[in-house]
C-alpha cells in the first residue's frame, strides 16, 4: 500500500494524494485495528496543562479502554469488514460512497471526513497524525483545487477516487485546529431545532399510556399521599408547641417497564409510548485536561445516552474548552439522528482551557431559542476543571464567580417551572462549589464522579430519571383545620415553601417527580389542649400537571388527626417521622461541617459530624434497626474520613459533601465518591427506572471497576480492568 502510494505521487509529479485500492490481504493491520476503536481511545493524544490554552504533546501514561459503546447495534461480525471510524459504518468500494485514505493510511468515508475537516481540523481522528493534505469539497471545474486521475490499471470506480488539497505550512499554535471549529459561524438564534414528529403527538402517547400493560392493574395513576403524626395520641390536658407531621408523597408508577434484554428498537418504541418525550442538552468539557482516558470514557458514556433516547426525544450537544460550540441543533433521536449524534461525539478532541461559563450560556440558549418544546427539558453539564475565564458577576478580586447569574430568570423558574441543570464534577480538580451552585439554583443535582470508570453509570442514573417523569409542577397545600392551630415551620430542603401571614396555610413547590419517586416533608405545628376524643390538625392536598396529557390533576386530600384520651400510659414516637427527622438532622450537620471546613477548621467539622452520629445512634429509629439510619451513619463517617486533612478535603472531601447535600436537599439520587453503586445514601433515593438504567449501563460495554484513587490526585488508570 505504502509503496503504491509513493510510486503514484512520484509518477504523477503532482501535489495530489490519490487512494489506491488494495486487496483484503494487503490491508494494513493498523487500519483494521483502528477501525474498531474510537478515535481518542486508540491514540496518543496531545494533552494540555490544566487551565492553559497552549498544548504540549505528551505520551499518555495510561492505556485507553475500548470505546465500543458508541457503536450502533448491528448484526453479524465486523472482523472482516472495513469500518469508518467516524460514522462506524461499513466501507466497501462500489457501494455509492467515496472513500478517502489519508497519508497516515487510515480510511474514512469521504463525506464523513470532509465534514470533520471543513472547520479546520487537520488531525487524523484515529491516530492524531497531523495531515499535510486534507479532503475538500468544491466544484469539479476548479482545476486548482480538484483534479481527476484515472490510470489505466486502476478501477474506474468513483468511490475510490479522492483528490486532496495540500495544506499550508503548519501554524505555530497547535490549538488553532480546534479554534477554527469553535469560532466557525453559528446562527444568532438557535431556532433550527427539529420539529416534533406529528405521528407521536402527546395525545397519541397519552392514549397508549393509559392502557395497562400485561400484569398491571387498573390502579389510578395519581400521586399517593400519606401522613404520619409524630404521636398517634396526646392526652387532652397536654399541649405541644413543636409537633411534627410527616407528609409522604409517592409518584405514580411507570405504566411499562423496559426489558433490558429485549431488542433495543422495540423496547425504545414501547417505552416511548408510556412517558413524556425529553429535550436534553449536554454541555461537555473537552479542554486539554480531558485528553486520553477521560475523553474516551466520556464518548462511551454519551454513546450510552444516545442509544437510550427514544425517537421522540431530542438531543443537542455543546462542547466547550476555551470557548463553546454547538455541535448540532436539537434533533430527534431517530436512526439518522442517532447516527449524526454519534458522529459528532466521536469527532470530539481535547484542547484548550476551561470556559464553563460560555458552555453554559450556549446550552441555555439552545433551550430558550427552540421553536418547539418537548414536555420534559433538562441540561447535563460535565467538567473536570476550574473555569479559567472571566465570569460575569465577579465582585472583589478574590471572590468566587457568581455562576448563578449565568442562569437566566426563565431557567430558574421566573417564567414558570425550572429547567434543571444536572452538573457532574469529573475527577479531583473540578470546581465543586461552582458546579453545586449552578445545579442548586436551577433545581438540578450535583454529582461527584471520583473514579473515571463511573462516568457512564452516573449519566445512566441521571437519564433513568429524566426518561420517567410522570409529575410536573407539583404543588402541595397545607391548611390548618382549627383556628388555634398554627404552622410553625415547613422543612422541605431546597424546595420552595411559603407560609401565609397568619401561619394557618402553607404550600410547597415540589417540581417534577420521576416514576415511583417519593418526597418527604416535615410540618411543625402546635397542638393545643383539647376537650374532645379526636383533634384534627391539618389537611394536606396536592395538585400537579400530567406531562403527557398536560392536564391538571388534583389528588384527594388527607386530614391529619390524633386521638385525645384522658390519660396515656405509653405512646411511642412514629418511626417514619423519626427517620425523616434523622435525615434532616444529618443534612444540617453536613452543611455546618462544610462551613467549618471552608474556613479551615477541620477539627470542628469532624466534631460536628461525630456529634450527629452519636445523636442518630440514640434515636428511636436507629434502635429499631432502621436501614436509613445505618446508611446515614456510614455517610457521615465517610465525610469524617474525607476531612482528615486539608489536602484530603481539597482533593475529594468538598465535592463529596456537596454531592451529599444536593442529594438530601432535593431527595434525589446523585453519583458521589467511587461509584453510584456505593453503600452511601444514594440508594435510598434511587427509583426503579434509575436502577434499571444502571443495570443496562453495567452490561452495555466492558466495564472498569471504579476504585477510590489515592488521596493525592493521580491520573493513573488500571492497566488491566477487572470485570465488575
Image (cartoon, helix red, strand yellow):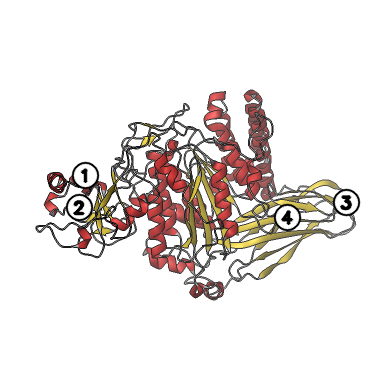
Name the disc covering residue 314, or none: none
Tell me residue 605's x, y (percent).
64, 28
Pointer 4 residue: 508
Question: Dot 3 lies on which element?
Answer: loop
User: Which badge, 3 or 4, is on the more N-terminal residue?
Assistant: 4
Mark 2 closeness class: few <14, some 14–19, many ≥20 residues within 10 Å: many
Question: Dot 1 lies on which element?
Answer: helix
Task: Determine which quarter of the picture holds residue 617.
Answer: top right
Name the disc covering residue 30, or none: 1
Residues under numbered marks 2 and 4 in contact, where contact means CB atoms less than 8 Å apart:
no
Which is closer to the viewer, label 2 or label 4? 2
Residues under numbered marks 3 and 4 in contact, where contact means CB atoms less than 8 Å apart:
no
Residue 20 visible in rendering: yes
Pointer 2 residue: 19
Mark 1 closeness class: few <14, some 14–19, many ≥20 residues within 10 Å: few
Question: Dot 4 lies on which element?
Answer: strand
Residues under numbered marks 3 and 2 in contact, where contact means CB atoms less than 8 Å apart:
no
Which is closer to the viewer, label 3 or label 2? 2
Name the disc covering residue 528, or none: 3
Which is closer to the viewer, label 3 or label 4? 4
Image: 180 above or below 272? above
Label 3 and label 4: CA atoms lie apart by 25 Å
Residue shown at 53%/24% (left/top)? 647
- Which of 140/655 is in front? 140
User: Which badge, 4 or 1, is on the more N-terminal residue?
Assistant: 1
Label 2 and label 1: CA atoms lie apart by 17 Å
Task: Determine which quarter of the picture holds residue 78.
Answer: bottom left
Amino acid at each position: 500500500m505504502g509503496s503504491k502510494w509513493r510510486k503514484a505521487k512520484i509518477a504523477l509529479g503532482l501535489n495530489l494524494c490519490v487512494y489506491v485500492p488494495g486487496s483484503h490481504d494487503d490491508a494494513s493491520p493498523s487500519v483494521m485495528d483502528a477501525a474498531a476503536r474510537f478515535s481518542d481511545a486508540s491514540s496518543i493524544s496531545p494533552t494540555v496543562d490544566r487551565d492553559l490554552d497552549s498544548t504540549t504533546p505528551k505520551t499518555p501514561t495510561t492505556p485507553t479502554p475500548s470505546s465500543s459503546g458508541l457503536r450502533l447495534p448491528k448484526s453479524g461480525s465486523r472482523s472482516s469488514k472495513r469500518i469508518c471510524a467516524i460514522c462506524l459504518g461499513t466501507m466497501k468500494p462500489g457501494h455509492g460512497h467515496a472513500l478517502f485514505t489519508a497519508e497516515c493510511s487510515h480510511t474514512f468515508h469521504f463525506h464523513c471526513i470532509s465534514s470533520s475537516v471543513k472547520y479546520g481540523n487537520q488531525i487524523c481522528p484515529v491516530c492524531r497524525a497531523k495531515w499535510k493534505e486534507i479532503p475538500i469539497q468544491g466544484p469539479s471545474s476548479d482545476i486548482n483545487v480538484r483534479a481527476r486521475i484515472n490510470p489505466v490499471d486502476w478501477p474506474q470506480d468513483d468511490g475510490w477516487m479522492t483528490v486532496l488539497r495540500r495544506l499550508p505550512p503548519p501554524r505555530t499554535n497547535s490549538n488553532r485546529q480546534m479554534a477554527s471549529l469553535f469560532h466557525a459561524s453559528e446562527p444568532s438564534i438557535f431556532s433550527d431545532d427539529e420539529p416534533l414528529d406529528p405521528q407521536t403527538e402527546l395525545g397519541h402517547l397519552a392514549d397508549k399510556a393509559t392502557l395497562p400493560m400485561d400484569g398491571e392493574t387498573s390502579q389510578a395513576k395519581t400521586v399517593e399521599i400519606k401522613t404520619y403524626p409524630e404521636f398517634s395520641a396526646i392526652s387532652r390536658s397536654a399541649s405541644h408547641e413543636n409537633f411534627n407531621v410527616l407528609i409522604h408523597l409517592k409518584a405514580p408508577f411507570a405504566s411499562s417497564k423496559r426489558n433490558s434484554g429485549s431488542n433495543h428498537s422495540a423496547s425504545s418504541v414501547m417505552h416511548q409510548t408510556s412517558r413524556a418525550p425529553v429535550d436534553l442538552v449536554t454541555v461537555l468539557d473537552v479542554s486539554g485536561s480531558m485528553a486520553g482516558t477521560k475523553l474516551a470514557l466520556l464518548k462511551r458514556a454519551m454513546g450510552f445516552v444516545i442509544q437510550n433516547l427514544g425517537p421522540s426525544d431530542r438531543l443537542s450537544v455543546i462542547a466547550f474548552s476555551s470557548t463553546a460550540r454547538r455541535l448540532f441543533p436539537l434533533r430527534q433521536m431517530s436512526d439518522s439522528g442517532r447516527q449524526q449524534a454519534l458522529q459528532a461525539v466521536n469527532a470530539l478532541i481535547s484542547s484548550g482551557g476551561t470556559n464553563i461559563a460560555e458552555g453554559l450560556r450556549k446550552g441555555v440558549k439552545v433551550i430558550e431559542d427552540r421553536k418547539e418544546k418537548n414536555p420534559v427539558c433538562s441540561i447535563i453539564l460535565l467538567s473536570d476543571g476550574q473555569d479559567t475565564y472571566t465570569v460575569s458577576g465577579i465582585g472583589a478580586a478574590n471572590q468566587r464567580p457568581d455562576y448563578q447569574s449565568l442562569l437566566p430568570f426563565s431557567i430558574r423558574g421566573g417564567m414558570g417551572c425550572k429547567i434543571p441543570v444536572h452538573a457532574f464534577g469529573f475527577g479531583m480538580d473540578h470546581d465543586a462549589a461552582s458546579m453545586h451552585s449552578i445545579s442548586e439554583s436551577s433545581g438540578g443535582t450535583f454529582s461527584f464522579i471520583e473514579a473515571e470508570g463511573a462516568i457512564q453509570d452516573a449519566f445512566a442514573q441521571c437519564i433513568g430519571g429524566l426518561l420517567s417523569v410522570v409529575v410536573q409542577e407539583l404543588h402541595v397545600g397545607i391548611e390548618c383545620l382549627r383556628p388555634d392551630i398554627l404552622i410553625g415551620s415547613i422543612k422541605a430542603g431546597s424546595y420552595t415553601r411559603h407560609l401565609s401571614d397568619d401561619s394557618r396555610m402553607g404550600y410547597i413547590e415540589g417540581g417534577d417527580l420521576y416514576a415511583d419517586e417519593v418526597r418527604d416533608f416535615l410540618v411543625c405545628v402546635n397542638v393545643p389542649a383539647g376537650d374532645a376524643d379526636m383533634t384534627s390538625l391539618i389537611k394536606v392536598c396536592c395538585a400537579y400537571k400530567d406531562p403527557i396529557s398536560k392536564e391538571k390533576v388534583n389528588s384527594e386530600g388527607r386530614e391529619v388527626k390524633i386521638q385525645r384520651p384522658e390519660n396515656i400510659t405509653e405512646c411511642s414516637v412514629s418511626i417514619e417521622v423519626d427517620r425523616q427527622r434523622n435525615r434532616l438532622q444529618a443534612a444540617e450537620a453536613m452543611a455546618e461541617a462544610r462551613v467549618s471546613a471552608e474556613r479551615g477548621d477541620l477539627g470542628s467539622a469532624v466534631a460536628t459530624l461525630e456529634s450527629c452520629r452519636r445523636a442518630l445512634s440514640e434515636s428511636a429509629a436507629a434502635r429499631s434497626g432502621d436501614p436509613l439510619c445505618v446508611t446515614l451513619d456510614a455517610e457521615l463517617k465517610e465525610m469524617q474520613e474525607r476531612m482528615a486533612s486539608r489536602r484530603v478535603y481539597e482533593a475529594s472531601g468538598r465535592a463529596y459533601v456537596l454531592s451529599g447535600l444536593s442529594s438530601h436537599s432535593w431527595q434525589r439520587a446523585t453519583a458521589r465518591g467511587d461509584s453510584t453503586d456505593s453503600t452511601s445514601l444514594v440508594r435510598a433515593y434511587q427509583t426503579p427506572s434509575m436502577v434499571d438504567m444502571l443495570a443496562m449501563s453495567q452490561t452495555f460495554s466492558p466495564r472498569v471497576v471504579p476504585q477510590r484513587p489515592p488521596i493525592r490526585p493521580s491520573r493513573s488508570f488500571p492497566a488491566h480492568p477487572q470485570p465488575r
